[in-house]
Image (cartoon, helix red, strand yellow):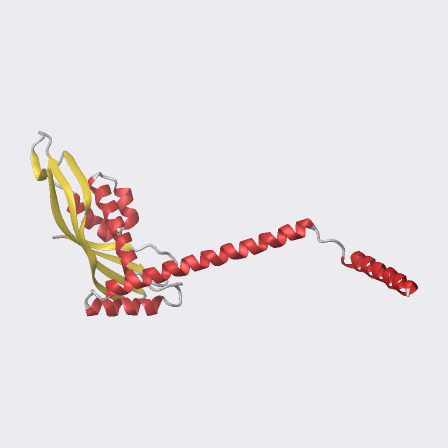
Amino acid sequence: MLVDIIVFAVMAVLIISKLYKTLGQIDPSDRSSNNKREGQYFVVEEANLERKLQYDKETAEEEKIRATLDDEVRLGLDKLDNMLKDTEDARFMSHKFVHKASIALEMVLNAAYNGQISVVRKLTTSSALEQIKSICSVPNASKVDYAFIGFDKNYIKGINFAGDLCYIELLFEVESMYAVFDANGSLIDGMQNKVVKNIYLCTFEKSLKSASNIWLISDITKE
């Protein structure tokens, strides 16, 4: 009986030794690498989840805004969604577009009144550039004090298509302080130290075949 126990014990030692030589020890670097890969996986999954939650939030906000728009504008946005679905990862978010368009108009007005035409040129077509020059120029002006305050209103008025071009018309009600003086220091346009409101109708255009996300101002009028 004792002999059998000894034999089995020897066999167990030999089997364990064989397995140890065959499989080897777990390399600490392998364990670290596995942990790193698992960590990267969870980081990516968490980022994907955050993006999805953000997209769902933006989609819900977009639905609320579209419900307040005119039928023609809403149909235009639906058409734009369909035209972009093969090139865009997500639907066209009109509320984000209005926000970016507002920033563009603010930059254009500030630049135009301060004589920075090179900035205006980057954000407009050639025809819109001439319109803005006309809007912001005053005969016999020697000094222009312009301070952009903000938007009282900004929303999409219409959407049109011509081939692969899309035109989105927006209305902006802009609050600003604007005063123009002649060489003698006399006020010749605007009102000094007083906030005034002006309405701008702007059309932004973009080729839907273009990979660029830049929409240029192609038409602008001041009411």
Relative horizontal placement of residue 36, taking residue 57 as reference (left or right): right
Quadrant of residue 49 within the rendered picture: bottom left
Which residue is depicted at the point 58% across and 55% down? 37
Does residue 187 lie above or below 221 as drawn?
Answer: above
- Which percent across, then down, holds residue 32? 63, 50
Which residue is depicted at the point 19% across and 43% down? 149
- Which percent across, then down, holds residue 19? 79, 60
From this viewpoint, is residue 210 visible?
A: no
- Which percent across, then down, holds residue 218? 24, 55
Relative horizontal placement of residue 30, taking residue 24 as reference (left or right): left
Between 182 and 77, which is closer to the camera in this rendering? 77
Residue furthest to the front: 1
Quadrant of residue 18 within the rendered picture: bottom right
The quadrant of the image that shows the N terminus is bottom right
Does residue 142 lie above or below 175 as drawn?
Answer: above
- Total labels drawn: 0
Between 93 and 54, which is closer to the camera in this rendering? 54
From this viewpoint, is residue 153 visible?
A: yes
- Which percent across, then down, holds residue 206? 31, 59
Between 192 and 96, which is closer to the camera in this rendering? 96
Residue furthest to the top: 184
Which residue is depicted at the point 38% across and 60% down? 53
Between 5 and 50, which is closer to the camera in this rendering? 5
Residue furthest to the right: 3
Does residue 37 lie above or below 181 as drawn?
Answer: below
Quadrant of residue 57 within the rendered picture: bottom left
